[in-house]
Image (spheres, helix red, strand yellow):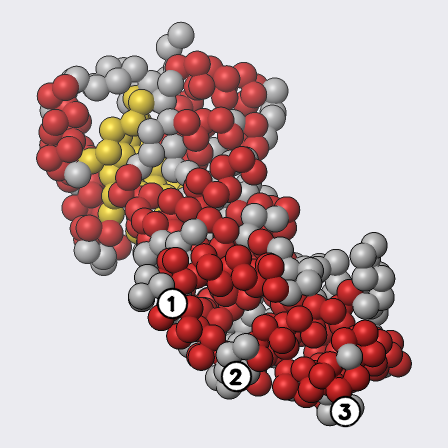
Amino acid sequence: MYTPEWEIEELIAQNPGLLGYPFRRLKLLERQKYLKKVGRYIDLLFKQGDYYLLVEVKSNFVDDKSVILNQVIPYKKALAEELGVQEDKVLCTIISPIGFSKEIERLCKEKGVVTKIINKSRLTYALKLSTKNRNLHAETRDIRTLSLNQSFENTHMKELANLFIRISNSAPIMAHEVYTGSNGVLTSNNDMWFWLFYSVMDRRANASTFIKAKEALERERLFAPYKIVNLVKIRGEKAALNKIAKILEQNNFPLLNDNKMGKLSFPKSIVDAAKFLGLYGYDFMCLYEAYVKKYNGNLKRARDSLWNDLQESIYGVGPRIASQIIRGLVLKGPWNLPLDDNKFLEKCRYNVWMAGNSRLGLIEDESEYNEKLGKFADDFLDGNRGIIAHVLWFIRKRYCNRPPKCRECPLNNFCLRASSLNFSAL
């Protein structure tokens, strides 16, 4: 089936996903843009961040060098001059539903022009949807199986990764600090103890209320871990648990009631955490150094051993919370442990939602979460998966809660929802 160039052009303008660009964050600037210097027209001009994408559409098999040498390359030079940007800020793609000769592919590779074949069956599918006035942007998601524009993909990923790093550096890690402007840095043993205290209770509870539990115990001079351990030594563990529970209840802090410990579940976690820290003189750097020394400086073995011991030693701490504890003390504290294991990605329904098609488009399906985000971390974040989990959590809490604050969000240039609302700051 023959498809005229104008119709292919129209479909791409409506749905940039046909280009195979993975995030569909291209903004269409102009169709048939006139270039005064060469007296010719660019079929499609898109923009992403600081980069421009020039798209030349052909409906036939491309085997004529003049298409590249007399059209695409001169268009690139003229456009860069007209826009006042360097030529390397203008990327070029030539589209054909049929294909390119080997000679043209070699020439395009030499000149930095990306060739893309839009599969006929995909194009036919898109055309059928178009005739039924269907939303091509949503209905042709499977077109992402096309080959990717490597230049754009790498640029996009690098920019996103750098933004993730900046956000993580400046964002807190505790829920009650999300709107305070705090960077969440843990500078003292008291700060780090609160992070451990906070984390061991972070299950089926509103984490933003944990500061109230801290304040309630401080008023009774029973927040410091050594005071908790002393209370256990003097009155016994059961009495200590009941006293902590009573203090929290009297201050209207909601206690978790589980099958094993009942209302003593949170107090048990707090006491166990204090005991664990007490083994290292209530000093977080001593704890860290003890594990590093035990494994002769092998940071991965030290990390994994600590991760297991946290679960075995503290009631209620499972894989997710153990990972959270370590992640926070690395990202915001003094520890230097690698966060290059997928357990630090914290795969949960909220993070899957943030990484998926409703927001950042980093994954297509929940099953890809660890694989795709792990690769993103390896390629662009030196393997640091903790940054990804931290940023997904913070952005969701700070900007995606109702009502969403898309205009303020630092990721709005990369978010599919913000793009659909025309909040992109391109």
Q: Nearer the viewer, residue 306 or 105?
A: 306
Name which residue type carries label 1: Lys
> Mark 2 near mark 3, Cβ–Cβ under 8 Å?
no
In the displayed structure image, the side of residue 194 where residue 328 appears, left or right: left
Task: Name which of mark 3 and mark 1 comes first in the sequence.
Answer: 3
Give SS at disc 3.
helix
Task: Tell me, for residue 294, which label it has, or none.
Answer: 1
In the displayed structure image, the side of residue 258 where residue 33 appears, left or right: left
Report crowding for label 3: few under 14, some 14 to 19, many 20 or more residues within 10 A (C-alpha). Answer: few
Provide the residue designation for mark 3.
219
| Residue occupying the far top of the picture | 1
Q: Quick check: 128 above or below 44?
A: above
Task: Name which of mark 1 and mark 2 comes first in the sequence.
Answer: 2
Provide the residue designation for mark 2.
281
| Residue occupying the far right of the picture | 250
Q: Where is residue 258? Give x, y as percent.
A: 82, 57
Residue at 36% from the left image edge and 63% from the top image edge: 295
